[in-house]
Amino acid sequence: MIKINLLPVRASRKKETLKQQQTIFLLSLLSVVIVAFALYFFLQFKIGAAKEEIARSESEIQELKAKIGKINELKKLKEEVKKKVDVLTSLRKGKDGPVLRLVTLSDSSPDKLWLTRYAESGLETSIAGIAYNEELIASFMRNLEASPDFENVELIVSEQMEMSGTKVKKFELKMKIQNPGSESPAQKK
């Protein structure tokens, strides 16, 4: 009988299978390493892009903060200008009041009556002057009471004095301003 030795074939098959398994293992390991490196580089690229986006956003935020600062400055300037315009408006409104009251005083003053002092304090007004007689003072008071600018005209003092050798009456009146809509800004305070 013929004997066949199968041991070398089995041993060669085992060696071949072992080589194939080692090759498959190395190829698998190599492919895992390549995939890991590819994933690593992909993630590094994504991180770099995100950092660039963050840096760009931060620079935009700084630019916007600068613009907001300028806008806030403009708002403050606008408020200051508005306050100044309001003051100018109130001054324009108030400039006519005292002028009109002085015109009323001038129109109400009879001849031979002179005013020596005029003072306003809020809505209170005081006037001092000199007249030749009491009738002129009474006429002046009636004219003031009839005017649209003054009310509650009161005689505070009326005394006789001598001026340049002539006897005259020194007087002082107190009254209220009737139309406060035309009062000056200083009176409103």
Image: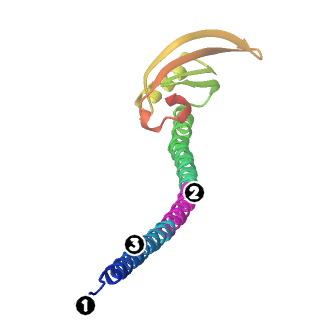
Mark 2 and mark 1: span between their CA atoms?
95 Å
Q: Is residue 29 left or right of residue 14?
A: right
Residue designated by label 2: 62
**Amino acid bearing label 1:** Ile
Residue designated by label 3: 25
Mark 3 and mark 1: span between their CA atoms?
40 Å
Query: Could you say which is closer to the camera, residue 55 or residue 75?
Result: 55
Query: Could you say which is closer to the camera, residue 86 or residue 167?
Result: 86
Q: Is residue 150 left or right of residue 74?
A: left
Disc 2 element = helix
**Amino acid bearing label 3:** Phe
Give the mark nearest the N terminus, 2 or 1.
1
Tell me where the magenta segment starts and ends, as one range.
Answer: 45-66
* Neighbourhood count class around disc 3 (C-alpha, 10 Å): few under 14, some 14–19, many 20 upward: few
Q: Is residue 43 left or right of residue 109?
A: left
* Neighbourhood count class around disc 1 (C-alpha, 10 Å): few under 14, some 14–19, many 20 upward: few
The answer to if 97 sits in the magenta stretch is: no
Image coordinates for residue 141, horizontal then vertical, percent: 48, 23
Q: Residue at x 56, y 31 (%)?
A: 186
Query: Could you say which is closer to the camera, residue 24 or residue 73?
Result: 24
Q: Residue at x 57, y 11 (%)?
A: 158
Mark 2 and mark 3: span between their CA atoms?
55 Å
Image coordinates for residue 168, horizontal then vertical, percent: 65, 15
Main SS of residues in magenta:
helix
Query: Could you say which is closer to the camera, residue 180 or residue 103?
Result: 180
Residue designated by label 1: 2
